[in-house]
Image: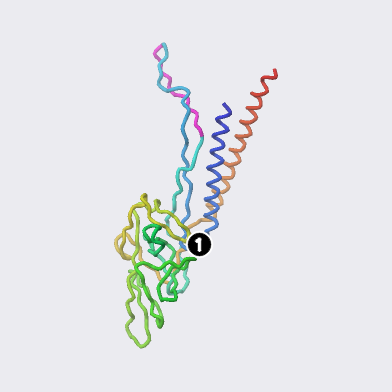
Amino acid sequence: MAVSALHSAATGLSALSTEIDIVANNLANVNTTGFKSSRANFEDLLYQQKAQPGVENANGDQRPAGIFVGLGTRISNTQFDFTTGSPVDTGRDLDLMIDGNGFFQVSVLPEIGNGIGYTRAGNFFVNRDGEVVLGNSQGPRLEPPITVPTDALRIEVSADGNVFAFLPAQVDPANLGQIQLASFVNPNGLQSIGGNLYIESTASGPPIQGNPGEGQFGSILQRFLESSNVDPVKELVALIKTQRAFEMNSQTIQAADQALQVIGNLRRF
């Protein structure tokens, strides 16, 4: 009956409304350093089985197909797109980009993700204690920690993640430490907590740590930042398609409502 159509269309409106929210968030972060776009994956709901396929009649013939009426749709999950964004030349010593696989590690609150957050953003700063920190609103410290001397003239970061400082009256640069990266078996299982940060979850698995340029890990590009990988054209096309699908589901509700009105008016005849 038309009542089932009302419920199915309602689930479509709810799921498509969520997809519009996801596309809007992608477009809002088109200029966010290291941002990874996400998409909504849909799945259908349960089906009403009105006739079972393969049932035999009195003549021994089998029904070639059944009758199944679906009950709508829902969003099964959101999936991150971890393709590398375009490099942007900034010229800053502490702007770093991972050319390939891996995440920078920063400290977060101990009760969140075992105290370690993961990010593709490489816009680092030096705080008042000389520690290298991520340039978001919280300023989490890079892990393992690296401290820059106050009299450092220049910072150099090699492709393998070694950090050097050129100091006054010293010919050879001082090695300040080694940047380590982390990767995950299932990065789509990471939990986004805002501030360009992710934390591990049961679905992502534990982090796999290593040095840049070794094995599966990408190398470090100094004085570059990774831009957002959001494609505005694709997102606008997706927004238009979602809007049209939303309108069609609303028209389904109107058609089902009109059918119910016709049924309700039958009692007058």
Question: How far across and down, in percent of the image, does residue 166 sit?
Answer: 37, 81
Q: Is residue 255 above or below residue 212?
A: above
Tag count: 1
Q: Is residue 259 above or below residue 78?
A: above
Quadrant in the picture for the C terminus: top right
Which residue in the protein does label 1 denote? 32
Question: How far across and down, in percent of the image, does residue 28 sit?
Answer: 55, 57
**Residue lying furthest front in this view?**
111
Question: How far across and down, in percent of the image, does residue 156 sit?
Answer: 38, 76
Find numbered disc 1 in the image and state the secondary structure of the residue it sits on: loop
Q: Is residue 115 magenta?
A: no
In this view of the protein, which residue sits in the foreground, 260 or 252? Answer: 260
**Residue lying furthest top in this view?**
58
What residue is shown at x 47% (from left), y 71% (from top)? 90
What residue is shown at x 36% (from left), y 50% (from top)? 202
Q: Is residue 203 above or below residue 183?
A: above
Q: Quadrant of residue 113?
A: bottom left
**Residue lying furthest left in this view?**
215
| First to last magenta residue range | 59-71
In-image side of 37 versus 248 (left or right): left
What residue is shown at x 35% (from left), y 74% (from top)? 163
Residue type of the residue flagged with mark 1: Thr
